[in-house]
Image (cartoon, coloured by chain):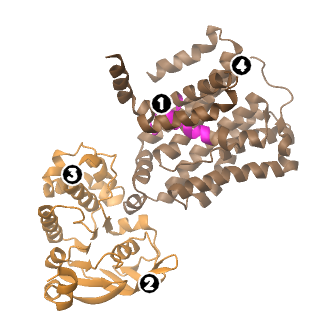
Amino acid sequence: MPFVILAILAALPLTGLSSYAMHLVILVVMWSVVGMAWNLLGGYCGQVSFGHAAYFGVGAYTAGILYTKMAISPWWGVPLSIPVVALFSFFLGYIVLRLRGPFFALATLASGEVMRVTAENLVDFTGGTLGIMIQERTWVEKTWYYYIILLVATVTFVLVKKLAESKLGYYFVAIREDQDAAESMGINTTLYKTLALCISGCLTGAAGAFYMNYMGYIDPNVVFALHDISIITIMIVMVGGVATYWGPVVGAVIMVLLAEWIRSIPGLGTAHYTFFGILLIIIIIFLPNGIVGDFPKLKRLLKLQKA
Amino acid sequence: MLEIRGIDVSYGDTQVIRDLSLEVRKGEVVALIGANGAGKSTTLKTISGLLRARKGEILFEGTPVHKAEAYKLIGMGLSLCPEARRLFVEMTVDENLDMGSLKGEAKRQRQRTKEAVFGLFPRLKERRRQIAGTLSGGEQQMAAIGRGLMSLPKLLMFDEPSLGLAPILVREIFDIIKKIREDGTTVLIVEQNVKQSLAAADRAYVLETGRLVMQGTGEALLSNEHVRTAYLGV
């Protein structure tokens, strides 16, 4: 099944989709990466982060600063963002992972905002609110961008699946279920939580570095955005299904398409957050495990409608 | 085997345990009893390293453990069966038992220990593939005790094993605790069910508002006037 989907996805550019359709597909795949990364930390390890924009932004700025300061291709940012974000997550984790539950969530939320304000003010380094613009984009055509992010997504999917099925995955779930009990069973919870955060952060950062290359422009309000990055990431996983392999992918498809569709309705466009909010309420009430997690229930509901 | 020397424990500014000392000798069943908020669970959490004592020391087989990381204690033979079962509710019974034997000797002996646990709790064997959260209260308590035994502990600590169980199950749990002791594991129980735990214990300590007020053999405390009026209501 995953191979069939991958084959279909790999053949997608050959079907002659319009440039706009390809753009949407690329966004869906990129958001799947961020969603899957968040899911590793939030879904499996139970550490709900409201600040994944911090990692996304640091990844994006790694690529951008490599280009402006060191004059090398921002594509280096995709691999190089991994050690940078790993280091960054490690330090951030050292602070925020001492906290639990809602306090952890609030601390991560703050960390994203702190990064945004920092990037706005380190003008010499980041270009401040002017942002970073790549003068010449690598390709005009979208095919290669698509294959690159598809590769990142495939690696992410396989990595998350392998991790979740390994001993480490059991440790993560044990920490999610009961941190004290896990600690009493001999699991070094600090170590494994940090590990989950670092891996999740690195994958998110790689997506951020791709974003820099693909969009060609970033500024602090775009890549460190609370609503547009951190909250959307959580929504993608919530809608698709927390702690499921395909949840973030399904969630990304729905959220990207929904955002595009609502924004194109005249007069309603600016209210798309309102619709996201309503969608989230519906999901929490009727499908608390998301579309993938509650798929049997969803099928039953639809059948009931027909009968 | 376990020796606590004059510990003070606080949550922030609120001091919960004051100058507590107690001892558990090898092969004993020791009970720590007291009312709600007396500091019983806090004591257990401090022994297992989930909380830190502000003062005093804790020795396990002569080694100071009050500064050791909680996850390392299980390797030394100190195992906690936490309050309200605290199973990993989305894992199966089998997986929960595996979680109790993650490292070293316990991992190598996993299959053999599991058979022994199933011998103690035949019900768990029938339900080994079932998700732990769907077990009944009593079965969950059995699974939690089983998980505690999987680490081949020298000292097994129980935090309120009778909490939320029907009287007939409480008796069953205390019978199991006796069996565990006969198999050579030392036991420390923290309980509100004073009658049952005093009957099962060799020795007991009575804790009131964070201070030790009495100690003695289970039998002696059972007939003690203060214990009878304060805890048994007779």
Q: CA distance from mark 4 to mark 2?
A: 65 Å
Magenta stretch: residue A150 in it?
A: no
In percent of the image, x 22 and y 46: which residue is there? B128
Which amino acid type is shown beneath numbered disc 4?
A: Lys
Secondary structure character of the magenta stretch overall: helix
Determine if residue A178 is in view. Answer: yes
The disc labelled 3 sits on which kind of residue?
Ser
A267 versus B229 height, above or below? above
Chain B's colour? orange
**Residue located beneath label 1 in the image:** A246
Q: Where, by quadrant of the figure, is residue A62 drawn?
A: top right
User: Both on one chain, marks 2 and 3?
Assistant: yes
Q: Earlier in the sequence, mark 4 or mark 1?
A: 4
Q: Which residue is under mark 3?
A: B136
Residue B153 location, x and y as percent?
Answer: 28, 67
Q: Secondary structure at mark 1?
A: loop
Find chain A in the image and tell me its colour.
brown
Residue at mark 2: B8
Mark 2, secondary structure of its residue: strand
Magenta stretch?
A231-249
Instruction: Name, please, the residue furthest toward the front.
Output: A267
Residue denoted by label 4: A142
The residue lying toward the viewer, choosing from B35 and A192, is B35
What residue appears at the point 71 percent right and 44 percent down from the top-left corner?
A224
Q: Give the residue drawn at x 33%, y 76%.
A: B40
Q: Position of residue B62 (x, y in %)?
A: 36, 82
Q: CA distance from mark 2 to mark 3?
A: 37 Å
